[in-house]
Image (cartoon, rainbow, N blue to C red):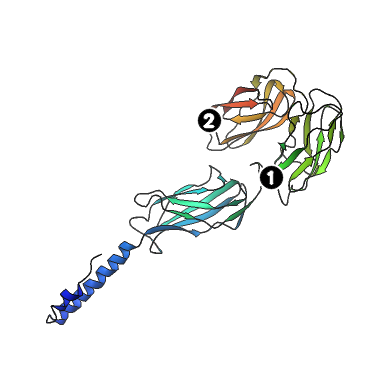
Amino acid sequence: MSRIPVKRAGRYIRASIAVLVSVSAFSVALLDAGTAMASGIGITFTGEPPASAVAGLPVTVAVSIRNDGQTITSGAGSKDVVTIGSSCALSQSSSLTETAAGGIAHFPSVTIETGSSCTLVATDTTTPHNGVIAASSAIVVSPGPPSHLAFTVWPAPGEATAGTAVAPFTVAVEDVYDNVETTGVGSSDVITITSPCALSGTTTLSADSGIATFTDVVPSVSGACPLVATDGTRAIAAVSSAVLSLPLPSTPLKVVRVSRSVTVGTATTIAIVGRGFYGRPRVLTDATNIRALVTQDKRTVLTVVVTAQSSARRGIHIFTIILLDGKRTSVHVTVV
């Protein structure tokens, strides 16, 4: 940092007052410049997220690019590009990358999908300030409305025998993003277990913090006995899931056709026709912005609710069907 040497200035004490005033002003200017150069560029959340949010509902935040605590309203830094990330899963349809205007980047729609306590992290991606980050205050995230049931723990195939209780299993009430309804709506719903095989024991329970744990469900016969969980408290989109508790049949898994295409931006119910659909198979998709949830399996027809976000690529996608015993097959689904 440039400075005016005191000793050198002392040699010119005979200089005119005008010169001394000029030197003094120049010295102050240099000191000010040195302070500015010593300060660093930083970013901060000037529009913090709310203390609480609901999964699936957008929140609004704002991030400022600053120099020495002051927002850079013009010039270098005032138009930097800022991105938002999080310790929780964010919807890819959110506004996660914005360009600052007058030193402030506004994010009108940041949507958290999964997580319970989240922090947003803003990152400046514009040279030479790229890599500068800021963390928001914490957000407590509540699940969205109940959407479906899910077997979160289930007996392995072949574990149970007729007349004997199957191993303990749990059923969770979840929102569309698979968050368990731990409090509030859905957290104490009444869950009932049924099956094509006659059942005895305790087959109806109230969920505790969104989870019902069944320890005394007894099938009466051996063979293919899928267990179906139904929410008796509310009508929700996907009301059942199934698990095969008794030995799997030898019927090979095969797909014949898909009944219809999937529309971007909507939740579309499709039927996959074939055979061997036992025990609520999982369906995996080839894109993160396309979700598939099995709502019913009838051995020859698999009913699947597919949600394709607006960012999903149109065209042919590959869905993989996986049974509990690891058997799998693929099917092509058209997204339009």
- Numbered tag placed on residue 316 in the rendering: none
- Find disc 2 in the rendering and name its residue: 314
Q: Are marks 1 and 2 in contact (CB under 8 Å)?
A: no
- Give the answer, above or below, for where 156 lies relative to 10: above
Name the foreground residue: 126 vs 60.
126
Q: Residue at x 49, y 47 (%)?
A: 96
**Spot occupied by residue 76 in the image (x, y as percentages of width and height):** 33, 55
Name the foreground residue: 293 vs 183.
183
SS class of the residue under badge 1?
loop
Give the quarter of the image for residue 215.
Answer: top right
- Specify the amino acid type for callout 2: Arg
The magenta span reads: 158-163
**Spot occupied by residue 167 in the image (x, y as percentages of width and height):** 78, 34
SS class of the residue under badge 2?
loop
Q: Residues within 10 Å of mark 2 (few under 14, many from 20)?
A: some
Give the quarter of the image for residue 205.
Answer: top right
- Find disc 1 in the rendering and name its residue: 180
- Cα separation, mark 1 vs mark 2, equals 31 Å
- Residue 162 drawn in magenta: yes
Q: Residue at x 69, y 17 (%)?
A: 252
- Give the answer, above or below, for where 260 lies relative to 105: above
- Give the answer, above or below, for where 163 lies relative to 32: above
